[in-house]
Amino acid sequence: MSRRGYIGLFTILLILGSSSARIWTASALVDNQDDFNLALNAEGDVEESINAPSTVNMSQLDLYDYYETVKADRRFKWKITELERTENFHLKEGDKKLKEGDKIILIMGGDPWLQRSQPHSWGQIYVNDVMARYTSDTATGRAIFKFLQPVGINYIENFTSTYYNSSEFLNDYENNYNYTDFLADYYGNIYNYTDMGSEGFFNYVETSPFINRTFWTFEENLVTYENTIISEVNNITEITLVFDRPTGLLNEMYYSASFINGSEYFAGVNLTLIRLHGWGLPYYITTWVVWIPIILVVVGIIVAFRLHAFQRLKLYLEARKLAKRD
């Protein structure tokens, strides 16, 4: 192959690579503590795990749809950009104690739609390069939904039996679960859309009568969750989560907690988690800051070859050498 052929092939591969680079974005999480009366133990240590959101109904996993890039061999990354804590406070992911600079990675071991009801079989959480282990498959599944939310709920999969296709059921569904104006007007149009209102999971969160929206703020492309939990006087946990609405990936998490026991012994933490995409850049910085210089360099090289700039430079340098010898 000629030199121009190699350059053309390299340029095509570069363009294809740049077009496939995507921004990885947002998800949901709620700090669901089983025991709100946390107290410091004899050593004065507190260990906290940030648990999965109650917005994901684990009994409905078979109905969830995911963003198109959520498939086998994909990796989604978040970085702890700030972590301030007292010596006696340990924040954990699985069995791993977190520290500033740690990268939390969701590795897709399979395609969710092949085993939707078993998230532990298609997703694994890593802290840096070490798998975070959980006490059960259910805990593993809930941990995944801290970082990855579904983007749609396919209720039509339930409309297959005679009962679900009866006018009585459809009328009841429309009256009680009308998340959009046209969800189930009558029997004939129940098959005309592919998910709940064709607007996705966060549309469900925004409009469902079963979700407490006191803590939620919904925008066109972002969904924000904010909550403050006071388990005892002076024992306070605050959390803010920013999700990417179109993709279901967690963008940012801000977490703070403080605990004071009966002897006034204090433990606390502040954490900031930011999603990463190409080359470890934060999600809000486009990968074009990397691609544009690369493309400019490649285009410059191509132009240089076309204008025989390298040959001219070579001749110029050789001429200088000859001139010095003379």
Image: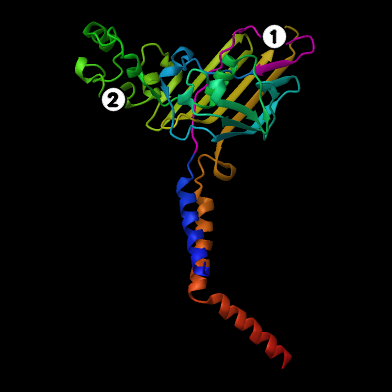
Nearest the eye: 204 or 41: 204
Q: 150 or 285, which lies in front?
A: 150
Q: Residue at x 67, y 22 (%)?
A: 91
Residue 65 sits above or below residue 137 on the image:
below
Can you give x and y, in whole percent of width and height, for residue 220 in the image? 37, 31
Residue 223: percent from the left, percent from the top? 44, 27
Total numbered labels placed on residues in the image = 2
Q: Which residues are magenta?
A: 24-48
Q: Residue at x 76, y 8 (%)?
A: 263
Quarter the C terminus occupies: bottom right
Above or below: residue 298 compared with residue 85: below
- One can see residue 239 in this view: no
Name the residue beneath numbered marker 1: 39
Q: Secondary structure at mark 1?
A: loop
Q: Secondary structure at mark 2?
A: loop
The residue beneath circle 2 is 193
Taken as a whole, is the magenta stretch helix, strand or loop? loop
Neighbours of disc 1 within 10 Å: few (<14), some (14-19), many (20+):
some
* 83 with respect to 228 (left or right): right
Q: Amino acid at mark 2?
A: Tyr
One can see residue 259 in this view: yes
Q: Position of residue 110 (x, y in %)?
A: 53, 29
